[in-house]
Amino acid sequence: MRSVSIVAWSNIKRRKVQSILVILTMMVSIVLFSTSIGILQNQNDPFEQMFEKQQGSQVVLDFDQRHTDLDIFVSWWKSQDEIVDVITYPYMMISDSIVHNGSTKSMGSVMITERVNHDYQTDLLTFVEGAKKEYPGENEVFIPTGYAYNWNIELNDQLIISLNGVPVLFNVAGIVVDPQYSATLTSPSRIWVQDSTLKNYYTDVELHQSLVSIRFHDYSDYETLMTRYESDFGHPFFGFIYDYDFIAYMYTFVESIIAMIMLVFSIIILIISIIVIVFTITNGIRADLKQIGIYKTLGFSKKQTTQIYVFQYVVLLFFALPIGLFLSYSLIRLILKQLAQSVGLNSISPDYFLIGIVTSIVMLFLIVLSTILSSRMAINIKPIETIRYSVSEKVNKKTNISLAKLKHMNVSCMIAVKSILSNLKHSIFIFISVAVLSLVFTFSFNMYHSISKMNDNLSMWGFDASEVFVTTDSKSEAMDYETFISTFANHSQISAISLHGVMVDASIASQDDISSTTALGFVYGGVWDDIGLTNIKGSNPLNNDEVSISYLTAEKYKKSVGDQIVLYVAGIEKTMKITGIYQSLNAGGWGFRVKAESVIEIDPNYDLPRYLIKLNDNEDVNYFIDEFNALHGDIYTARSVKDSGEINVDQIVVMIGLVSVTLSLIFGVVSVIIIFNFMMMYIFDHHKEFGIYKAIGMDEKTLRDSLRIKIIFLSCLGVIMGIPLALHLTPVLLSLFINNMGLARFPFEVNIVFTLFVFPLAVLIQLFSVNIATKKLKSINLRELIVD
């Protein structure tokens, strides 16, 4: 064994550059593979630790007491043996702009919620900033971490919030971890105020909504109790249900997407790494034919010959493992940092021991297996043959390509074409590796572009395409629906107007032996096509008995366009015809869309609080808003949808950007290593041929140009294959990742500039590798070749 280790170490030392490149190849494989596994394993840990520590309520029911008596409702839940505690929090939804330290800005919809007097054993708050106390004081607020980080709110900041038209100054007394509402993606968020604060500004009739928080002894009883509730009350619960699964989903959504993407590409990297190692070993064997023949003459067995290469590459793996695992650990911490901050952790220490063990075992198995398979060539080498001729018949395959057939080309092109055709395996792999590189670049650039353009393509994400929404400040002076529409329908800047509201007293009734589902109803008036509402199947409703349902709703109830579905609309059971199926991230992908006229037909006084306005093309949104507020600001408030903050994708864009950069860098490094190795192999294998070219008068520049032409040609072919493949596969792959989140088809947008930039970028990366590798041509010595 000592002799095997000596030879292996000698090989490593003689080929330092190649050994370093193999270590780098292994290292990036380790980083990507272990990072993806690490995120998948650890993404729920910070949330679960926080939720258990703060004894968060696993279910929060958004309750509207206009349809069910609140006391009866709460009493029923408290009477159930499976329940630990039930707490009722009155709240008021606020969508108006907030004045933050003197600056007025739209900060999304928030629920101004009273932190009621209660002996809190559940729904505890953790203070990240500020003095710990159970309740906010007078004119004080507690802000959840996610909302604070999104809008740069700090301790002791001043917020002026309009409560029923009255501007009220609040001081930020604490930045807190709210078990259910601290995720940065959660919208609307929840701001805590002192008990009875809302009663100072709203009547009892206006304060009809509450959040009912329920803590279970065992969360697995949740479905049983909801079935029991429907049986006892005679209908499903009306209102949005914020359950534990959905809460966890909001906290870990971005990390889940990142992990799945990285896992897919880590497998590709592993395959490429194995192929690189196989070719590197093959290269080493061809370069060491004489030495291998000598070793065999001295008594090395077939087993020992194989052990040389196994030992050599296992040693390189042991160099790569600690560096790769360390980088992976740091990357996992970086990706999970956003989640850790939102749950009140200054840092996070992922459980990495098992990940390191699994990664080490997988890598060791793959390296040993690939080394054994690829070193079989050395076993078949005949000692006398290699010592005498420095070549083996097993590895010396002559080519029939004649330069005379290529005489119409210049010399560099002739050599390049001969190289491509006489080494098809190498050429095909270079072509495939460049295709994969361009695929990853195209995937990363356009994935990031699609996410970053989400605000400009909201209809495909399940939202409408309105640019302005108008809320009523003075209901006593406001116009009725018909008057408002007729007043502004012919406005020169307006393309479409729609009455809009979110219906919480809605549900999908049990049918066809499938249980009921609590889901929001999204109410729209006017012509839906004009306001930008789209469907992936069918069309928008035209009649009052028609409805469009979400993709997840259709999947659960096995419904398609033209089918009938039983819904609760405004608390009334109604059978409606499905005209369309839409996809949406809104409300977790569940729900349905119904015409405003349908709701008004059931309840003429139903509160539909806002109008949506879509402007004509090229109209200035801010100019329209300023003009509208100047004329009607005493009754209505107009705001930009884009600037409102209700749909906040900044965190998603940042994290997806991190993934895009990481993937691109990793594959770029791997590509440099691959091409360098392959050029080195080619030069090793054909050093006599290059020596002959030098002997007949060719200079080094001509030979290097031939290899550059070869790589440019193969790179162009690879990019031509990789870019279209990426444009086809990216939406398919991303659709698979987010299918259970409500989107059947990922809204993929191609950035032409980024995509075209992939072409020169991929080619330049290959040229960079070739320029380094071809310096080896200088070391080809004619005198040594004559001796050989």
Image: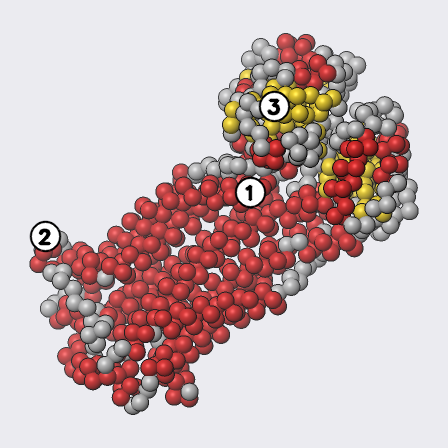
- Secondary element type, mark 1: helix
Q: Which residue is drawn at 41% across and 76% down?
A: 310
Q: Pinpoint residue 452: horizontal percent, then vertical percent.
A: 53, 40
User: Of 104 and 423, which appears nearest the observer?
Assistant: 423
Q: Where's the N terminus, which quadrant?
A: bottom left
Q: Which mark is residue 564?
A: 3
How many numbered discs, if any? 3
Circle 2 is placed at which residue position?
A: 408
Q: Callout 1: 10 Å neighbours few (<14), some, many (20+)?
A: some
The residue beneath circle 1 is 738
Name above or below for residue 11 compared with residue 160. below
Pair 1/3: label in front: 3
Furthest-bottom residue in this view? 298
Q: Nearer the viewer, residue 742 or 179?
A: 742
Sooner in the amino-acid sequence: mark 2 or mark 1: 2
- For the residues labelled 1 and 3, the Cα–Cα distance comes to 27 Å
| Above or below, comparing residue 361 to residue 593 in the picture | below
Q: Which amino acid does label 2 sit on?
A: His
Between label 2 and label 3, give the one nearer the viewer.
Answer: 3
What type is the residue that disc 3 sits on?
Gln
What is the spatial separation of the Cα atoms under label 2 and label 1, in whole angstroms?
A: 55 Å
What residue sits 21% from the left and 69% below the top? Answer: 686
- Left of 132 or right of it: where is 388? left
Q: In this view, does 317 lie to the left or right of 410?
A: right
The answer to which of marks 1 and 3 sits earlier in the sequence is 3
Q: Residue 669 at what x, y percent from top left?
A: 42, 60
